[in-house]
Image: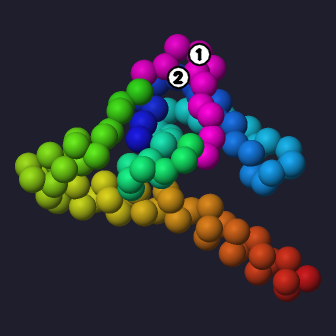
Amino acid sequence: MYLILQGKMSLNAQKEVGRENLTIELGQGDVFGEIGITGPSARTSTVRAVDNSVLLHITEHTLNDLEQGAPKIAFTLYLNLVAIVEAPFVRGRSTNSAVKSR
């Protein structure tokens, strides 16, 4: 998992086979690669630097060390990871509800 400390990144993901790719610009404070922190999984997107960038690489080992040395910080980080991973699904439910109510 990577946290963008400085710079801009371009995330490109194919939403569905045969569909147009989705491109999102990421900047300072954004996170990518969070799905991979949960265990081995196939890549779901490609991320490239748009300009000079500084990233913080957070590995599973880093998280394990954090759990041992600073469990309160680790807990807060895990809560934030859940919010990041959950956000697209919550937005999808909100969009679906709005469409159904029309």
Q: Quadrant of the C terminus?
A: bottom right
Crowding near the residue tagged with mark 1, few <14, some 14–19, many ≥20 C-alpha atoms within 10 Å: few
- Residue, x 69% and y 75% (percent of image)? 93
The percent coordinates of residue 65 (x first, y second) are 14, 46
Q: Amino acid at mark 1?
A: Asp
Residue behind mark 1: 51
Nearest the camera: 98 or 20?
20
Local secondary structure at mark 1: loop
1 and 2 marks in contact (CB < 8 Å) = yes
Residue behind mark 2: 7
- Residue, x 86% and y 48% (percent of image)? 18
- Residue, x 59% and y 31% (percent of image)? 47
Q: Which residues are magenta?
A: 44-54
Local secondary structure at mark 2: loop
Q: Amino acid at mark 2?
A: Gly
Magenta stretch encompasses residue 83: no
